[in-house]
Image: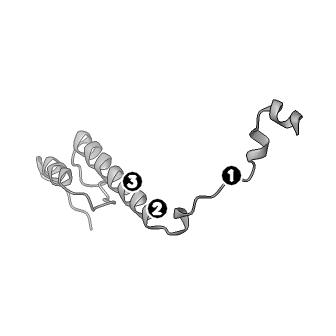
């Protein structure tokens, strides 16, 4: 479905997205809502996606474990290696 925005429709979408923190995707290709509005809406969509990604990482139980670096011995100072 293609909806073209009226002259101020892009601005209305932009203002609506300023308060929204849940929408992560919106197809604006054929809306003719204007470059500035499209840019601002896409910035908000990006920040919503990033917030969603961060929340999913916080919810992931596997990442709660602290994993020691497996190659830590490679990065020790040379003087500590020669003493051993």
Q: Residues within 10 Å of mark 3 (few under 14, many from 20)?
A: few
Q: Which mark is residue 42?
A: none
Q: Give how far apart the Cα atoms at labels 2 and 1 are.
A: 20 Å
On the image, which quarter does residue 31 sit in? bottom left
Residue 81 found in image quarter: top right
- Which residue is the site of mark 3? 50
Q: Badge 1: few (under 14), some or many (20 or more) residues near its Cα, within 10 Å?
A: few
Q: Position of residue 37 (x, y in %)?
A: 22, 44
Q: In the picture, residue 39 is in which quadrant?
A: top left
In this figure, what is the number of numbered marks? Answer: 3
| Quadrant for the N terminus in the image | bottom left
Q: Earlier in the sequence, mark 3 or mark 1?
A: 3
Q: Secondary structure at mark 1?
A: loop
Q: Residue at x 88, y 40 (%)?
A: 84
State the residue in front, 81 or 43: 81
Q: Earlier in the sequence, mark 2 or mark 1?
A: 2
Helix, strand or loop status at disc 3? helix
Q: Badge 2, how many Cα within 10 Å: few under 14, some, many 20+? A: few
Mark 2: which secondary structure? Answer: helix
Q: How is the image coloured?
A: one colour
Label 3 vs label 1, nearer the camera: 1
Residue 83 locus on image (x, y percent): 87, 35
Which residue is disc 2 drawn over? Answer: 57
Look at 48% across and 67% down and name the residue there. 60
């Amino acid at each position: 479905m293609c909806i073209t925005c009226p002259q101020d429709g892009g601005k209305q979408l932009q203002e609506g997205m300023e308060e929204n923190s849940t929408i992560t995707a919106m197809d604006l290709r054929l809306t003719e809502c204007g470059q500035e509005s499209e840019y601002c809406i896409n910035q908000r969509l990006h920040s919503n996606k990033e917030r969603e990604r961060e929340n999913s990482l916080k919810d992931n139980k596997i990442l709660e474990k602290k994993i020691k670096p497996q190659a830590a011995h490679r990065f020790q100072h040379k003087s500590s290696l020669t003493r051993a």
